[in-house]
Amino acid sequence: MPQRRRGEALKTAIYDATVEILEQEGYEAVTFQNVAKKANTTRSVLYRYFDNTFHLIYEASRAHVQKNQKWHGTVMDQEFNTGQMRTDLLAMMTYLRENAALFPKNFLSFIYFEQAQGKHRMDGLLPGVIESNIIIMERILARAQERGEAREKIARAAKLLPFELSRYHIFVENRPISDENLIELIDDILLPLYKK
């Protein structure tokens, strides 16, 4: 029997086992028993680190994204400052699409399933996500206003629209938004909404 891991090595083994099961067998197969067996640990160890399988899958998926070479930080870490509102919006929406593609297979459908079941597991996370979305849009729009491209008063709902439409494609349509739809969204919906 292989030696049991401890500390960060143990956590990495747990995350890797979780992602492997999630991608190969689906989220229904991610149980503490299955993960413990694959990671060569015990269920009691998993209960020490994680409240439930949702918490385990969420943390393992975040770790999976962050160790991907294509991950360049959170959306909050990005500038999206190209000198024009249209290309700033395009850069931001493209970044959202590419970041979503880094999550393990079956992760986003798992999140959608959990929300659709009324479990509201994301409720504690959503306020922070929404506030960061507002901050990102306010940065883009403030620069556009300085350049005379955008009107001054833009409603909160209008600022959140790019993120909500992006989430719709990911969760409801279960696919990333296409280049063609992205351009249509920006040119036909967002720019007329924000323009001066």
Image (cartoon, grey):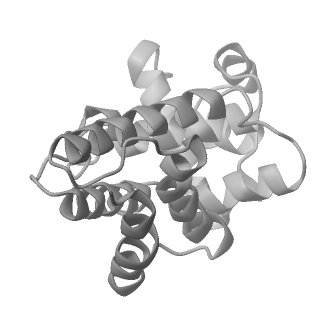
Between 17 and 121, the one lying in front of the other is 121
The vertical placement of 176 against 29, above or below, is: below
Between 35 and 111, the one lying in front of the other is 111
Residue lying at 34% horizontally and 60% vertically, measured from the top left: 195
Between 90 and 6, the one lying in front of the other is 90
Q: Is residue 178 visible in the rendered structure shown here? A: no
Residue lying at 54% horizontally and 34% vertically, measured from the top left: 129
Between 185 and 172, the one lying in front of the other is 185
Residue lying at 62% horizontally and 41% vertically, measured from the top left: 57
Give coordinates of residue 104: x percent, y percent. 48, 56
The vertical placement of 97 against 152, above or below, is: below
Give coordinates of residue 54: x percent, y percent. 72, 38
Q: Quadrant of the C terminus?
A: bottom left
Residue 98, located in which quarter of the rendered image? bottom left
Residue 15 in the figure: left or right of residue 146: right
Residue 63 in the figure: left or right of residue 60: left
Residue 48, located in which quarter of the rendered image? top right
Farthest residue toward the left?
A: 83
The vertical placement of 95 against 156, above or below, is: below
The vertical placement of 170 against 99, above or below, is: below
Farthest residue toward the right?
A: 118
Give coordinates of residue 143: x percent, y percent. 20, 41
Residue lying at 33% horizontally and 34% vertically, measured from the top left: 76
